[in-house]
Amino acid sequence: MSGARPTPLAQKATRGTVVFSAVNFVGYAVSLLGTVVMGRILEPRSFGIGMLAVTIGEMFIATAGWSFSQALLRESDETVEAAFSTVVYLLAATAVVALVFATAVGAGVWLVTSPLIAEMFVAIVAGRLVGALADCYGSDLQRRFAYGRFSIGALVATVFANASAVALAAAGAGPWSLAWYDVASGLVSLGMYYAWSQWRFRRGFDRRKARELVAFGRSMIGVRIGDVVFRRYDNLIVGLLAGSTQLGLYSQAYVLAQTPTAVLGPALASVPVSTYARVQNDRRRTQRVYDFIMYLLVRSVVPMGLVLLLVPGQILRVLLGSAWAPGGHMLRALVAYAVLTPIFNH
């Protein structure tokens, strides 16, 4: 009914969507500013080297992660804190195994590409593992609809990671400044979410719960790998076949094509999931949430796509400099991806 008074859950979900989207927009503006500054410090080849390391790292971590933070969102209020302690044990074991395999994979990357990319790859994997633990603490904030603190934590991590990466680039660190971003973001996120989370690790490992969590992660691994392949396989192909310079141009065009997803994605990945989890047995309420989000989503992404379609080369030239203008045709070709990805993600 149109005159029905919003429920407390609906009010929390709406407020969370607005706050998270607003703060995330600021975070994206900071990231875009960092990209612009680094684009004027580093040449396309350095960007290409860094993105190749990031791509290999993401593909590796997709098989090492087990979606434990998402599993915690599904837990009941009675079991979630005990499940969290079990998750910490599982993450520790996962991290040890992942780092051992990352070292072995890094040796292969060393032979196929270069020692620099191999070293950056291992650093990126370590940073992503720290970020996985941070996400688990962040799950507590999401469950409590504390999206103000959750988004502020993400914003602080983004600001620090971008500022320190730019400082490293200016100091001559080159591609390493891109690898440092993952490490810095993971460490700051962990500190912020740990401080605000009500969960604390307590000794005690529940084998039955561990089996449930691993089973959930196993069922999600196909989604994770598919998502990473969908988003990153092109970087791998361009980098290996066309070289670092072309990958640098392509990666920056891709970053701008991700503007709608970057601005709206975190809110879509967090607020709707928490809301759907609460109303999953009420089809009518679930449909209302879905319709409302799609209404806002379509009216947000289409104008962004039109701008990217009409003036791609000018956007790259103004933001990054004339050296990046050759990537304009790549950006125009990615417009359909820019518009449709947020809708498909939801």
Image (cartoon, rainbow, N blue to C red):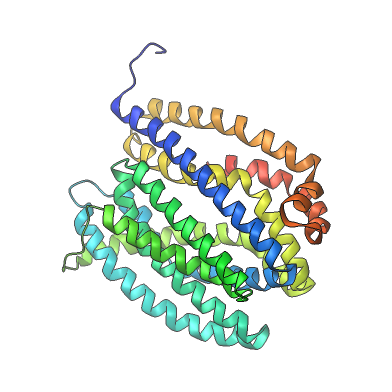
The part of the image, by quadrant, that contains residue 90 is: bottom left
Q: Is residue 66 among the parts visible in the rendering? A: no
**Closer to us: 60 or 215:** 60
Total count of labels: 0
Looking at the image, is 337 positioned above or below residue 81? Answer: above
**Closer to us: 303 or 1:** 303
Provide residue 41's location: percent of width, then percent of height: 68, 66
Looking at the image, is 336 positioned above or below residue 45? Answer: above
Residue 10 left/right relative to 327: left
Q: Is residue 235 among the parts visible in the rendering? A: yes
Residue 342 left/right relative to 186: right
Provide residue 148's location: percent of width, then percent of height: 36, 42
Q: Quadrant of the N terminus?
A: top left
Provide residue 53's location: percent of width, then percent of height: 60, 73
The part of the image, by quadrant, that contains residue 282 is: top left
**Closer to us: 230 or 30:** 30
- At 28% from the left edge and 42% from the top edge, which residue is drawn? 144
Looking at the image, is 215 positioned above or below residue 16? Answer: below
- At 58% from the left edge and 75% from the top edge, which residue is drawn? 176
The part of the image, by quadrant, that contains residue 45 is: bottom right
- At 76% from the left edge and 52% from the top edge, which residue is drawn? 316
Provide residue 125's location: percent of width, then percent of height: 48, 73
- At 32% from the left edge and 56% from the top edge, which residue is drawn? 193
Looking at the image, is 24 positioned above or below residue 178? Answer: above
**Closer to us: 321 or 58:** 321
